Image: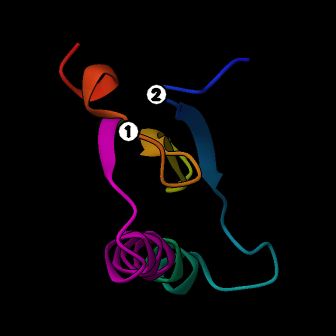
Amino acid sequence: MKRIKAACLLQTIHFQLKEDWEHDMAVRAVNEEFEHYKRYLQNHHIKYQIVEENRQPDGSLIVKVKKQYNNHSCEEYFNS
């Protein structure tokens, strides 16, 4: 029998600008979407760690995040 002892996702997420929006408004929307994403993780008690956050020349945002998977322990991944 096997049992999962720990599980973690490493995701790279690109928060892209809406193409049909004015640039400043689209950048603001990207920032709001990213903040909403972090609040979602917190409100759902999903453990996460932002590994990298890169603002692109066009104003979009690429984020690498480690996050808990299916309520499995993930502490060993966050400590490394």
For the residues labelled 2 and 1, say whether their Cβ atoms are less than 8 Å apart: yes
N-term-proximal mark, 2 vs 1: 2
Is residue 41 placed above or below 52 in the rendered structure? below
Give the residue number, with chain letter if any, for mark 2.
Answer: 6
Image x and y of residue 9, in percent: 56, 35
Residue 10: numbered disc: none
Q: Is residue 79 visible?
A: yes
Image x and y of residue 27, in percent: 49, 72
**Dividing the picture into quarters, in which one does residue 66 lie?**
top left
Name the quadrant of the C terminus.
top left
Real-space Cα separation, disc 2 to disc 1, in angstroms: 5 Å
Does residue 38 belong to the magenta stretch?
yes
Name the quadrant of the N terminus.
top right
Does residue 42 belong to the magenta stretch?
yes
- What amino acid is found at the position of numbered circle 2 in the picture? Ala
Residue 73: numbered disc: 1
Is residue 2 placed above or below 11 in the rendered structure? above
Snapshot colouring? rainbow
Q: Which residues are magenta?
A: 31-51
Label 1's element? loop
Image x and y of residue 13, in percent: 61, 46
Query: How many residues crowd mark 2 within 10 Å: few (<14), some (14–19), many (20+)?
Result: some
